[in-house]
Image (spheres, rainbow, N blue to C red):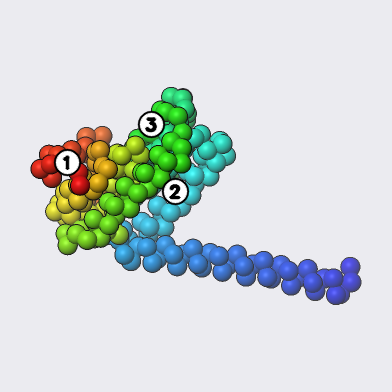
Amino acid sequence: MSRSLSGAIALLGSLSILASCAAAAVGAAGVTAVSLNQERTLGEAVDDAALSTDIKSRLLANGGLGEVDVEVSGRLVLLTGRVAFPELRVKAEDLAWASEMTRDVANEIQIEAPGGFAKNATDELISARVRARLLGSSSVKASNINVETYDGVVYLMGVARNERELTRAAEEASVARGVRQVVSYIRLRDSRGDIVPYTPQDPAPYDPDELAGGPGR
């Protein structure tokens, strides 16, 4: 092999390593920025990001299974969306549990036909309205709460600073226009600072009429 060819290969290898390092640095910086604005620690944010990527990769390797969305907070995996058959719903949950980092799984996937552009666009608009209400609330730190909407049902997920924020987030979401129901997976920390483990009875559906005293605005 000529010296010039060897040098070119070495240069390409160096550039590849530098590109990989740069990408890793950007990714790490992104996770750091997110964790600084949330109640999660940097370590928790990194773990959640890695777990989310792992599960999404598993879903993609199985064809996606349908319209399945993955959100992770405190290693609690929330699965939402739509699949055509019950066995696909079970498969998605199995894939979520397959990661050794998974602590809990909340499977909210619905068995129904794909939503289509109009339906999905409506759900995105509802999510935007909910996020706007959270941003406008003096009791809620909006960056603590993830919002997902399917068929008008809003799912909230994250770690709240206190009981007031946990309750108020659901109240604000419930009165956003178009919301049919709010299901909260928001959790608190215990006296040791650990995120309280998820239990099946935790997520309570919030009725907009009961919380707001009237139909959602």
Residue behind mark 1:
215
Q: Nearer the viewer, mark 2 or mark 1?
A: 1
N-terminal label among 2 and 1: 2
* Position of residue 141 measured from the top left corner of the image (x, y, whole percent): 24, 60
- Residue at the (14%, 53%) spot, across then down: 164
Label placed on residue 52: 2
Q: Are marks 1 and 3 in contact (CB under 8 Å)?
A: no
Q: Nearer the viewer, mark 1 or mark 3?
A: 1
Residue behind mark 3:
110
Q: Secondary structure at mark 3?
A: strand
Q: Secondary structure at mark 2?
A: helix
Left or right position of 66 against 135: right
Mark pair 1, 3: CA separation: 25 Å
For the N terminus, give its image quadrant: bottom right
Tell me the quarter of the picture where residue 206 sits: top left
Q: Are marks 2 and 3 in contact (CB under 8 Å)?
A: no
